[in-house]
Amino acid sequence: MYSTIRLHNAAPVRLRVRGPRTFEDIPSGELLAAAEHVFQVDCATWGSDEHLRAILELFDLKRLTTQVGTRMLEILERSNGTSRAASREATEIDHQRQPNISAGSIQSSKAR
C-alpha cells in the first residue's frame, strides 16, 4: 500500500525547484499550488497566458506550448473554481506558515 505521510499542520504540497524533472514529471498538485501562488502574488487573471507563463517561470521553464498549456488549463479547471475565489485567502494563510515562496526560495528535494 502506498500512502503519503506528512507532519501535522504541514502543507499538503511543497513547491520545489524543477531540477532535472521535465514538465511532465511535475505533479499536478504542485502545478496547482504554483498556480495559486502566482495568482496571489502577480494578480494575473486565472488561466490567462500571463498566468500560465508565470507558472512556467516559477519552474524555470520558458515555452508555453499547446501541449503544456492544455495540461495546465486542465489542472486549473479541475480545481472546480475553488482556487479562483478562495486562493487569495488560503494563500495568505499559507504565507503566514511559509512566507516568501518564490522561484529563488523554492526548496530542492535534493537539498534535504
Image: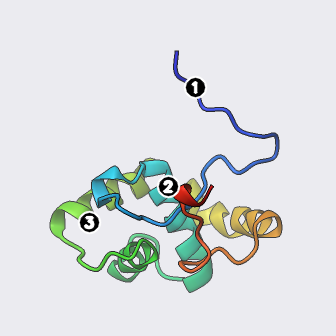
Q: Label 2 sits on what residue type?
A: Glu
- Disc 1 marks which residue? 3
Question: Could you classify mark 3 by the number of other residues whose Cα lies within 10 Å: few (under 14), some (14-19), or many (20 or more)?
Answer: some
Q: Residue at x 30, y 60 (%)?
A: 23
The reply to whether residue 80 is visible in this rendering is: no
Q: Residue at x 67, y 32 (%)?
A: 5
Please state the horizontal and vertical placement of residue 109, each as a whole percent of the image.
54, 55
Frontmost residue, 91 versus 18: 18
The part of the image, by quadrant, that contains residue 97 is: bottom right
Question: Could you classify mark 1 by the number of other residues whose Cα lies within 10 Å: few (under 14), some (14-19), or many (20 or more)?
Answer: few
The reply to whether residue 64 is visible in this rendering is: yes
Q: Earlier in the sequence, mark 3 or mark 2?
A: 2
Q: Earlier in the sequence, mark 2 or mark 1?
A: 1
Residue 23 horizontal side relative to residue 51, left or right: left
Residues under labels 3 and 2: Cα distance? 15 Å
Please state the horizontal and vertical placement of residue 101, each as a whole percent of the image.
65, 73
The part of the image, by quadrant, that contains residue 93 is: bottom right
Q: Is residue 101 above or below residue 93?
A: below
Q: Residue at x 42, y 57 (%)?
A: 76
Residues under labels 3 and 1: Cα distance? 30 Å
Frontmost residue, 79 versus 18: 18
Q: Secondary structure at mark 2?
A: helix
Q: Which mark is residue 84?
A: none
Residues under labels 2 and 1: Cα distance? 17 Å
- Disc 2 marks which residue? 30
Q: Which mark is residue 69?
A: 3
The part of the image, by quadrant, that contains residue 63 is: bottom left
Q: Secondary structure at mark 3?
A: helix
Which mark's residue is nearer the viewer, 3 or 2? Answer: 2
Q: Label 1 sits on what residue type?
A: Ser
Residue 109 horizontal side relative to residue 22, left or right: right
